[in-house]
Image (tube, rainbow, N blue to C red):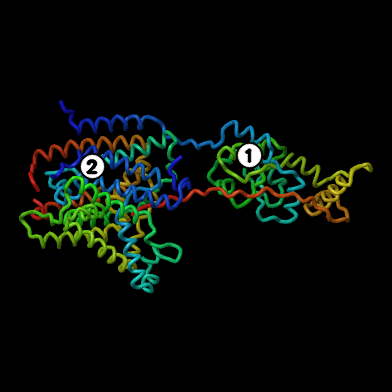
Amino acid sequence: MKLNQRILTSAILILLGLVIAMVPENTTRPYKLTPQQMVEEISIGTEMIQPDELADWLINNDPTLQLIDVRDPDAFDQFHLPGAVNIPLKDLLSDEWVDYLDQDVKMNVLYSNGTTKAHNCWMILDQLGYENNYVLQGGLNYWVETILNPQKPGAAVSDDELARYDFRKGASQALGGGIQTASPAVDKPKKAKPPVKRRKKKKAPEGGC
Amino acid sequence: MGPLFPQEIISGNWNLFLAFIMGILFGFILEQAGFSSSRKLVGVFYGYDTVVLKVFLTAAVTAMLGLLYFSLFGWIDLSLVYVNPTYLWPTIVGGIIMGVGFIMGGYCPGTSLCASAIGKIDAMFFFGGIFIGIFFFAEGYPLVKHFYMSGFMGAPKAYELLGISGGVFALLVIIAAALMFWGGEWAEKKFPREEY
Amino acid sequence: MRLKHMNPYLAGVLLGLTLLLTFFISGRGLGASGAVKKVLVAAVATAAPEHAAESAFYSKYSGVDKHPLRAWLVFEMLGVAIGGFLSGAIAGRLKFRNEHSPKITSKRRAVLAGIGGILFGFGSQLGRGCTSGSALTGMAVLSLQGFIAMMSIFGTAFIMAYFFRKNWI
């Protein structure tokens, strides 16, 4: 006997419809990296930015630099680095900030008081496939210690270390630190900035007649 | 993973080439289903042939289910799939004008090209008429522009208005489609017509 | 020899899978009337470039950076013509003929088809898509617009069917 085509079609479609009506919608955002890739990325440590590098870009008013403060708004209001935007950890995934975090124009440097919180944020962003995000090594605590209040090294130190001290002293002055001295920074450590990676842009869907 | 082109997994040229291939499949299936015959197409409005109803609804429901399942399995990112924006009033009035055109001309744009390709002369007249109709619209655009932009609601999904999930809504559409298939086959028996 | 038409449910499933594949590849659905628009825009831009540049309608679709014919729908519709021809050739349906009810003349059928085309062309622009681009594709993505368009097109045709019955049956 030939099965009625209409009943067969209707039955299969209704069955598939019942299943799809009962399962919840898939709203997960795909994570892009495997644990192995993550381990490799972290062990290389290219996501870390040293305070000296950051100070250099800040003094030069590098337009491609975007500082992102992941601490609470209260802490942000008390003190933050110049030009930083406040994206607290709990708002990291809100749509409001996607344009800041998922982009290929600027280099984002995340910071918190220490390294941990900023690094946690970076790991989430990295998993989501967002590029051009970095973490300030040591966070604000280390920043204040090294850049804003540099300690004069003892007598028996290398020239390198003296030069670094001079730079920090200058940076401290330029960035509003505690110690004011006369000598401006002349010898800046030249370090290449990580390049901003051009990411494959998703196109806005097009269609219609 | 998908959709491929919006994520630049394939290039623009590939996208156009595959559009051509998809078009071949589209045209082939339309012709195979009998959509190259105006009297078969309008049969749905008189009950003697409801092939349009069956093919159209089965296709819409199949693609609808496919998208929902693909999204469930994570094979396609639905936020990158184009959703037609809703301009309420122009859609309704445009639909009414198209409905009258449908019952007078016996085709719609896609089927008229498909039928023209196998030599249907009425389809060629219809296809030519589309050019004139769009030309009228283009020339009269400043006059209708205000209406054309009216009733804008963004690009809502139908189920969002009802406050139910996409899956439940799809199930309701499928049940409605199954009822219409049943009604269609009933009508074919009631209004039989041989050789047209 | 003329072959029979495909089972409508099978054809529907295949058409649905084609549409699904289109979404997967291009992130958009099938369409038809948009291709005619693109061809028309290209023709007007060639024949009367000044008029096309001034017009609010043509200038939307034409410009220095985009050629109106380098469009997804234009390539798709080229395929539709070829696909329809192939199917007709396989099934033995290639034949020049004007299909009409025996109760009306061939000329009347041609005029009605032409008027129907004009209305469909105009309506598809006002309604932002035809049966394929708006109703079928719109329903597949569950867009509100697709369901409104479907009900509006088929509902009107169903209501008007009575007045045009002599042309068909």
Chain of the residue on which disc 2 is drawn:
B
Query: Toward which corner of the image does residue B159 lie, by quadrant?
Result: top left
Give the residue furthest to the right: A155
Q: Is residue A163 left or right of residue B134?
A: right
From what the image shows, is residue B115 above or below residue A50? below
Give the residue number, with chain letter if any, for mark 2: B55
The amino acid pointed to by label 1 is: Trp
In-front residue for pair C60/A188 = A188
Residue at 72% x, 46% y: name it: A79
Crowding near the residue tagged with mark 2, few <14, some 14–19, many ≥20 C-alpha atoms within 10 Å: many
Where in the figure is residue A150, as x and y percent of width and height?
84, 45
Residue A74 appears in the figure: no
Instruction: Judge whether residue C166 can be spotted in this image.
Output: yes
Which residue is under mark 1?
A: A122
Identity, as a three-letter code, of the amino acid under mark 2: Val
**Circle 1 residues within 10 Å: few <14, some 14–19, many ≥20:** many
Q: To which quarter of the image does residue A115 belong?
A: top right
Q: Is residue B38 left or right of residue A192?
A: left
Mark 2: secondary structure: helix
User: What is the number of callouts on the image?
Assistant: 2
In the image, residue C57 sits, relative to residue A53, either above or below, namely: below
A46 sits to left or right of C157: right
Q: For marks 1 and 2, give the CA distance.
A: 50 Å
Q: Are marks 1 and 2 on the same chain?
A: no
Of A148 and A79, which appears nearest the observer?
Answer: A148
**In the displayed image of the protein, which residue is found farthest to the left?**
C103
Residue B126 is situated, as x and y percent measured from the top left of the image, at 20, 59
Q: Are marks 1 and 2 in contact (CB under 8 Å)?
A: no
Residue at image position (37%, 39%) is B67
